[in-house]
Image: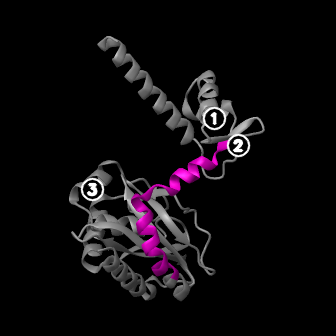
Amino acid sequence: MCPADRNNDAGDAASTAVRLTAILTAFRQGDEALGVSELARRCALPKSSVHRLTGHLVASGLLEREGQGVRLGLRLFEIGQLAVRQRGLVDAARPYLADLREATRNTVHLAVLEGTEVVYLDILRGSDAPRLPSRIGGRFPAHATAVGKAILAGSPESVVDAVVAAGLPRVSGRTVTAPGLLRRQLGRIRAEGLAYDREESGVGVVCAASPLYAADGTAVAAISLSGWTNRMRVDRVAPAVRTTALALSRTLS
C-alpha cells in the first residue's frame, strides 16, 4: 500500500469515528428511541450515513432497535461500568456520602471537572430535597455550581483561565458571569475550603460544596449538599460538608 492510500484510510477511519461519536452523543436526557431522520438532523449528517452507521452500532450492541427508531444499548452501560478511572473514587466516597445524606436528609453530589463542566459521578437524593436536574453522568457549567467552583479553587490557574476564556454563560438570574467576581469567589473558597451556590444553578436551590484533594494538594473532585433555599441553611450545613470532604480526602490520599 502506498503512503497516499494509508493516509486516505486513516482519514476515513477518523471520519467514521467522529460520525459514530456524534450519533451516540446525540441522545439527550429524556430521549427514548430516535428515528434516523431525527438523528441525522441532530448530527448534521446525511440520512443514508446515519442509517448505515446505526446498523453497525446495533450489531455491536451500542444501540438497540425500538420500533422504527433506536435507543442507547445495554452494552454502553456495561462499558461505562468498566471506566475504572473514577470507579475507585465513587466506591470510596459512597459511605461518606450516605452518612452526609442521612444526617441532613438533603441531596449529596460527587463530581469531577472535565473541561469547563462538572460531571456528576454519584448522586444520593435526600427525602426532603428538591428534584434537581442533575443526574449521574450529567454535566453542568462549572462556574454555575458549588462543586465546580470548589474544584476550580483547588486547581492550577491555567484551568481557571481556560474556564474564563471559554465564557461564563448565564444559567439563572444569579449565575456569576463576571470573570473578576468569579476569581474573587475562588480566592475565598481556597481560603475557607467551602463553595456556595445561592440559586446560581437554579431558582430556589442552594448548595454548599467542598473540594477533595489528592496527595499533591490538587483538587480532584468535590462533594456538595443541595436543598431548597427556604428549608436548608447553607451556613449551618457547610461545616458538615467540609468535615466529610476532609475525611474523604484523607482516605483518598
Could you tell whether 239 is left or right of 97 in the image? left
Q: Residue 159 carries which label?
A: 3
Residues in magenta, as a range: 71-98
Residue 49, given in percent of the width and then of the height, sits at: 59, 24
Does the CB distance between marks 1 and 2 fall below 8 Å? no
Kindly state the secondary structure of the residue where label 1 is placed. Answer: helix
Q: Distance between the residues labelled 1 and 2?
A: 16 Å
Of the pair 85 and 229, the residue shown nearer to us: 85
Answer with mark 3 or mark 2, whichever residue precedes in sequence: 2
Q: Mark 1 points at which residue?
A: 59
Foreground label between 1 and 3: 1
Separation (CA) of disc 3 from disc 2? 37 Å
Q: Are marks 3 and 2 in contact (CB under 8 Å)?
A: no
| Numbered disc in front, either 3 or 2 | 2
Q: Which of marks 1 and 2 is nearer the N terminus?
A: 2
Residue positioned 27% across, 58% down in the render: 160
Which image quarter is the C terminus in?
Answer: bottom left
- Camera sees residue 175: no
Relative vertical location of residue 7 with respect to residue 163 in this rendering, above or below: above
Q: The residue tagged with tag 3: helix, strand or loop?
A: helix
Q: Residue 150 carries which label?
A: none
Residue 201 rendering spot, x and y as whole percentages? 49, 64
Are the residues at dot 1 and dot 3 in contact (C-beta closer than 8 Å)? no
Q: Magenta includes 95?
A: yes
Q: How crowded is mark 3: few (under 14 residues within 10 Å), some or many (20 or more)?
A: some
Classify mark 1: residues with Cα within 10 Å, few (<14), some (14-19) or many (20+).
few
Report whether 70 appears left or right of 208.
Answer: right
Q: What residue type is labelled 2?
A: Ala
How packed is label 2: few (under 14 Cα within 10 Å), some, or many (20 or more)?
some
Instruction: Write down the residue under mark 2.
Output: 33
